Amino acid sequence: MVYEICEILVKEGEEAAFEAAVREAAPFFQRSKGCLGLELQRTIEAPSKYRLVIRWETLDDHIVHFRSSENFQEWRKLAGPFFAQPPHVEHTNVALTAF
C-alpha cells in the first residue's frame, strides 16, 4: 500500500468551503482504480493548512491512473479554487507500526 500525502494551503477564510468541496469530491477518489480510502486532516497550529492522506494499492494507481483521469479533473475543479498555492505531494510506505 502507498500513502499519498498532499499538503494543501487554503486561502484564509475559505476553510469551511474547502472542506465541503473535499467532501463532495471524495467519490471521485473512491471510485478510482486502486483507491483504498482517504482522510482530510486539518493542522491545529495553522488552520488553513491541511493534509489529504489517500491510500492507494500502488503508486501507479495514483500517478498513472488517477492523475490522467476525469476523476482527477473533477477533484481539481471542486477543490482547486480554494488552494492558496499548488499542493505539495509525497508518497510514503509504512516503515514501522507500534501501538
Image (cartoon, rainbow, N blue to C red):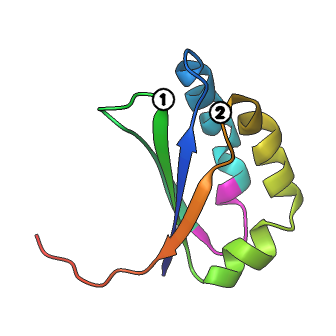
Above or below residue 5? Residue 46 is above
Look at the numbered disc 2 and give the secondary structure of its residue: loop
The mark found on residue 84 in the picture is: 2
Q: How crowded is mark 2: few (under 14 residues within 10 Å), some or many (20 or more)?
A: some
- The quadrant in which residue 31 appears is bottom right
The region drawn magenta spans 29-35
Q: How many marks?
A: 2
* Residue 47 location (% of width, % of height): 40, 28
Q: In this view, does 50 lie to the left or right of 25?
A: left
Above or below residue 12? Residue 2 is below
**Magenta run includes residue 95:** no
- The quadrant in which residue 24 appears is top right
Above or below residue 79? Residue 97 is below
Q: In this view, does 16 lie to the left or right of 65?
A: left
Residue in the image at 67% along x and 56% along y: 29
Look at the numbered disc 1 and give the secondary structure of its residue: loop
**Magenta run includes residue 31:** yes
* Residue 55 location (% of width, % of height): 51, 68
Residue type of the residue flagged with mark 2: Ala
The extreme left residue here reads 99
Residue in the image at 64% along x and 75% along y: 34
The mark found on residue 48 in the picture is: 1
Q: In which quarter of the image is the C terminus?
A: bottom left
